[in-house]
Amino acid sequence: MTRPAVRLAAAVLLGLAAPAAAQDDADRQMFIDANLLATYYHELGHALIDVAQAPVLGREEDAADALSTLLIHEIWEPESATDMLRATAAAWLWSDAEAAEEGLEPAYWDVHSLDLQRYYTQVCLFYGADPEARAELAQELELPEERAEGCEAEYALAADSWDAMLAGLTEGGEGRLVLLPSTADQGGDAGETADLAGYIALIAEEVADFNRDYQLPVDVEVAFESCGEANAFYDPETRRISLCTEYIDYMGALWDAN
Ligand SMILES: [Zn+2]
């Protein structure tokens, strides 16, 4: 499933020769792209668990998070994957700090793990996928040694579980991922999403790659939509992954604020 990370790698290479402002723009774009991809992979996890009727021990949210980190590791070349991991890890830290600043209590009741737990689990799985090459990264991202010791095993368990699930999706299914035309307003003062075309192209490539490798029991739609909140969803009723344009705007604002 490894393919060259053309778009992100190009942004990185461009940056080497680019003036500082252009480098900032490229970093900012990479931050938004990486988080959009990670969130898409997470929602894809929910969709796959639903349509394949896969049994999940533990929290489905954690299983979806694990798939997101696994796909970053498996699909992207190591350097791009590492950049993406840094970007998504930073988003957890920043959104956690932002919530603390606003005086919000950690949502212990939520179906998701807490932002900082999601941060450490993501760093742990990514480190555990290649501990030798990523020892420095684990230090940089302050993964405690007590946790780090078990990360290779944590990764192996997550990878085995998802690989077994994905192996069941290689033949016989009539369904595909279907990227819908965007219904989001692309005109006016639409901030980040004024250029929704770039984000749609990014996800279209993911959808095409997935459809080349896998078949589903039924179609699952993927849509860019305005949802009224900065989020993304999988709805089992409509079998649709919704990527909210507000989420893209939020990631841009999060970058600008940090
Ligand atoms: Zn979720």
Image (spheres, rainbow, N blue to C red):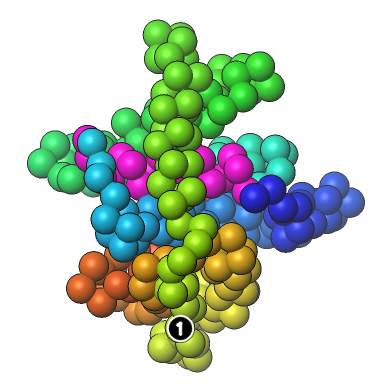
Q: Is residue 108 magenta?
A: no
The residue positioned 56% from the left and 45% from the top of the image is 72
Q: Quadrant of residue 250?
A: bottom left
Q: Position of residue 165 (x, y in %)?
A: 41, 47
Name which residue type carries label 1. Answer: Leu
Q: Is residue 61 magenta?
A: yes
Q: Examine the rendering and report whether any part of residue 227 can be seen.
A: yes
Q: How many marks?
A: 1
The residue positioned 45% from the left and 33% from the top of the image is 160
Q: Position of residue 221 (x, y in %)?
A: 39, 76
- Report the predominant secondary structure element of the magenta stretch: helix
Residue at mark 1: 180
Q: Examine the rendering and report whether any part of residue 100 can be seen.
A: no
Q: Position of residue 257 (x, y in %)?
A: 46, 51
Residue extending furthest right? 17
Q: Is residue 139 left or right of residue 114?
A: right
Q: Quadrant of residue 201?
A: bottom right
